[in-house]
């Protein structure tokens, strides 16, 4: 068996996340208690309010710490991965778990990353939507449609599975794209629970600011394989990969395909919900997939694997 952890990205955050593992696992408690930020992260994760938790200013730090707490709780129970990946923000969780970042550096970095993204994407001006269709060429053509482009940016942000692609951009452009996609037979387009157009060219200027932060952070060679969003493969230049990641398409399908080709046959989703698990099952139905977020799911996982 070759096991990999997959770390969730923004959009899955919910009030109460991490509370159970904090109470039940010393390894998880150690992660939460090590964090020192300019807001009460534990209180926001455990008690909300949801509106603040959804603000990318705060979401990124909260999800990073929650995910790492869950992962270390699993490791303490004997579930050890040999490879990791993460969706968007989850890539920072994956890199921190793999010891490329120190926890304190990662927490400070994603806090600033969230602020940079929030300032670049004022609330209410841009967003993202998931398109449920296996016709990627149709989605690409709609993004390039003159009616859409006249209203702003609309680009492919995530290739999540063979039948789900996320588009990202200005609100008006997304609305027109949604209208055209539905008219052309796409069965559903779902707005996402995010505060801006992540992984779009609207964040190119933000990527320059992020790069200035990244070059100041101590980054080590990961202790286990990390598969990156920009290519779906391990990358040697972490700074370059993370700088481009913020405004580039997340290649999640390629990531899973490459991990499977490299021998991964068991995936464990880390974080609230089961969004990534659903993607993996569609991309690679032959592998085993689990999701953990609390004591019950960790105990169940341990029973299945060990």
Image: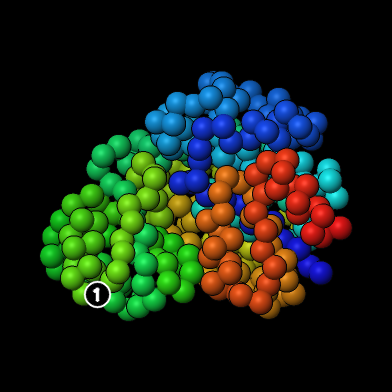
Q: From the viewer's perspective, is residue 150 above or below residue 125?
A: below
Instruction: Answer yes or no: is residue 164 visible.
Output: yes
* Label 1 packing within 10 angstroms: few (<14), some (14-19), many (20+): few
Q: Which residue is mark 1?
A: 185
Query: Horizontal and vertical percent for residue 264?
Result: 73, 70
Query: Horizontal and vertical percent for residue 121?
Result: 32, 41
SS at badge 1? loop
Locate the C terminus and report the quarter of the image it occupies: bottom right
Left or right side of 27 for 164: left
Query: Horizontal and vertical percent for residue 144?
Result: 23, 70
Q: From the viewer's perspective, is residue 297 above or below residue 277?
A: above
Query: Horizontal and vertical percent for residue 195?
Result: 36, 41
Image quadrant where residue 305 sits:
bottom right
Residue at screen point 40% across, 41% down = 117
Q: Nearer the viewer, residue 104 or 45?
A: 45
Residue at screen point 81% across, 53% down = 302
Q: Nearer the viewer, residue 9 or 184?
A: 184
Q: From the viewer's perspective, is residue 203 above or below residue 138?
A: above
Residue at screen point 79% across, 67% down = 2
Instruction: Answer yes or no: is residue 220 visible.
Output: no
Locate the N terminus and report the quarter of the image it occupies: bottom right
Left or right side of 107 for 250: left
Image quadrant where residue 86 sits:
bottom right
Left or right side of 265 for 281: left
Q: Nearer the viewer, residue 177 or 247?
A: 177
The chosen color scheme is rainbow
Residue at screen point 30% across, 69% down = 187
Q: Nearer the viewer, residue 106 or 217?
A: 106
Left or right side of 235 for 52: left
């Amino acid at each position: 068996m070759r096991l990999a952890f997959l770390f969730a990205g923004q959009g899955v955050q919910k009030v109460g996340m991490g509370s159970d593992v904090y109470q039940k696992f010393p390894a998880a408690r150690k992660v939460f208690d090590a964090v020192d930020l300019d807001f009460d992260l534990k209180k926001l994760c455990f008690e909300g309010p949801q509106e603040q938790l959804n603000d990318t200013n705060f979401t990124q730090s909260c999800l990073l710490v929650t995910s790492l707490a869950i992962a270390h709780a699993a490791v303490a129970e004997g579930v050890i991965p040999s490879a990791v990946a993460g969706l968007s923000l989850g890539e920072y969780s994956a890199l921190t778990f793999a010891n490329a970042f120190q926890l304190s550096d990662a927490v400070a970095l994603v806090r600033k990353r969230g602020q940079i993204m929030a300032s670049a994407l004022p609330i209410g001006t841009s967003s993202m939507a998931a398109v449920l269709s296996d016709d990627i060429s149709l989605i690409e053509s709609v993004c390039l449609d003159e009616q859409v482009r006249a209203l702003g940016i609309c680009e492919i942000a995530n290739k999540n599975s063979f039948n789900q692609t996320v588009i990202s951009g200005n609100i008006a452009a997304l609305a027109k794209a949604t209208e055209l996609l539905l008219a052309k037979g796409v069965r559903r387009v779902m707005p996402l629970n995010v505060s801006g157009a992540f992984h779009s060219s609207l964040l190119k200027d933000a990527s320059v600011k992020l790069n200035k932060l990244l070059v100041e952070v101590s980054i080590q060679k990961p202790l286990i394989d990390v598969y990156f969003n920009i290519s779906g493969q391990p990358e040697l230049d972490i700074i370059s990969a993370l700088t481009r990641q913020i405004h580039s398409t997340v290649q999640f399908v390629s990531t899973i395909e490459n991990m499977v080709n490299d021998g991964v046959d068991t995936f464990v989703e880390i974080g609230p919900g089961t969004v990534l698990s659903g993607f993996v099952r569609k991309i690679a139905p032959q592998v085993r997939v689990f999701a953990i977020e609390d004591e019950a799911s960790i105990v169940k996982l341990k029973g299945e694997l060990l």
